[in-house]
Amino acid sequence: MRVKTLQIVWHGNHKDPVFSVDFEPKGAGRFATAGGDGGVRIWRLAKDDNELPAVLFLADLNRHTEAANCVRWAPNGGILASASDDGTVMLWGQTEHTGAAFGEEDGASEAWRVMHILRGGTSAIYDIAWSPDSNFIVAACVDNTTRIFDVNAKKCIHALADHKHFVQGVAWDPLGKYFVSQSSDRSVNVYTCERKKGNFCPKLAARLTKLEPPTPVPRGENVPPETLPSQNSDQLPAASGEGKTHPKPRLFHDETLTSFFRRLTFSPDGSLLFAPAGIFRSNDDAEPKNAVHIYGRGRITGQPLACLPGNPKPSIAVRCSPIAYKLRNIPTRGPPLSATDTSSTSSPPSLFRLPHRYIYAVACQDALTVYDTQQLEPIAFIGGLHYATLTDVAWSADGRTLLMTSTDGYASVVSFEDGELGEPMDSMAEKIAATPPPRNPMLLQPGEVVMAASVHAETIIPAKHTRDEPLPTSVCGAPAAPEVKKRRIAPTFIGKTL
């Protein structure tokens, strides 16, 4: 793995913040950035086998009147959507190059024009996400609404007012069944995508705000249901011998978190949902830790399957590599995946029971951590590259390049060698389409929450009391992320080389 901060002017003449980055699917290294100068720029990443990638400027798109906060390519490529503080979502398409038009930067090798302008209000839009069929766009707005745009009809068809504060992140399920929104009101809303008489009708399925505690039930006794604590209650049940209750722990940071974005994401097969800006307390008296909460598809409306704590600064964005990799030889919890799989070693337990594995990056305010869905420990910790807060992160189509952007006006590139992250699966897209992902990818006891990659070995904490056998007392801990200094330093690796 090689890391480099690209010392070029991405936006504006005074190093304006770079708020977003996204690679075009199957775009041969083409990607887009959005900046505080209101501009959207198209670039290409050229990479030789033994050299760090070089960035080539392609086009400058200047139609937004205020800061551009997010850029996202359509799933099938070709069309770029950008969202801005001016309250619009612009859809860009490439046209025949006939020379620089008025307002375009000289030296552009491609010509892009606005195909459509989607308007649903005047409030700023912080984040956007495409539906898998590229027919709809969901937008996170600062007027506390989540807006749905019909790309073909070129209009806003829904304004969902289910949040009580700024909506800062949205994501769409790759299988098209759900979309989610995350707000600074400390909640993640899960919506189902329904159609009635041919019309798109989203329905609120769950509001994820609090961690449900164990519900102890005296064994061997018949306890009336009305005496048990309600799962909808805001209070924890009183401990034995105590006459008071405690508030249920919150899952996410409140509006005092100094970040414009809470960019959550699904895994490419839709089996996992990663929600940033999380917090976790191991007990009532412990200080809250910054965390990323991971939800399984079968329990997306319930409790998180796992939490990733440990970084001293809050997480603001999560992105998965589009490449699925073959599993490595690490034993898993529970029964084997097949009757012939009986391998057993002393290696740490696998975190998720999936027939493949994904690499995903967590961007915190001051550092980037790379994880593998098969193991507890992070693959790498990259810090000290930027002077200011990170804003977004994106993977190239081949999964070998990772870009991170920052409000200091710079972007850094992380380049992986061929095979460094593992052996890619063959024709993974066709396999996912033919075989839906498992409803519950983690074979743990129902209701468990795993603390992964924490400073010390953590306890597996049950969210609900469902089985009589005892829980494992701990999981394999991982070393703490190194302290990040306020200067540029070389990246520090954590864990073994893959």
Image (cartoon, rainbow, N blue to C red):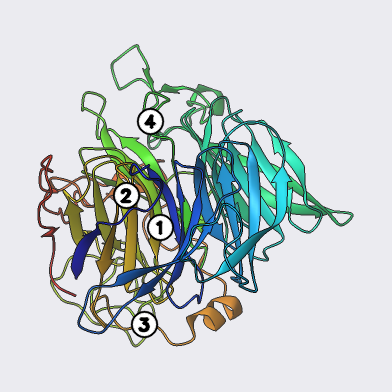
Distance of mark 2 from mark 3, alpha carbons? 24 Å
Nearest the viewer among 32 and 231 is 32
Callout 2 touching callout 4 (CB < 8 Å): no
| Circles 1 and 2: CB atoms closer than 8 Å | yes
Is residue 50 positioned above or below 38 on the image? below
Q: CA distance from mark 1 to mark 2?
A: 8 Å
Image coordinates of residue 213 in percent, x first then y, are: 38, 34
- Considering depth in this image, is 345 or 318 the residue closer to the camera? 318
Which residue is pictured at 60% across the width and 54% down the height? 102
- In this rendering, would 261 be left or right of 329? right
Closer to us: 405 or 265: 405
Tell me the residue that label 3 is attached to.
Answer: 424
Which amino acid, by three-letter code, is at mark 1?
Arg
Alpha-carbon span between mark 2 and mark 4:
16 Å
Camera-near label (3 vs 1) is: 1
Circle 2 packing at 10 Å, graded few (<14), some (14-19), many (20+), is many
Q: Classify 12 as above or below 57.
A: above
Q: Is residue 353 left or right of residue 331?
A: right
Q: Residues within 10 Å of mark 3 (few under 14, many from 20)?
A: some
Question: Counting residues from the N terminus, which is met first, the one under dot 3 or under dot 4?
Answer: 4
Query: Which residue position is annotated with label 4?
Result: 253
Return the residue at label 2: 363
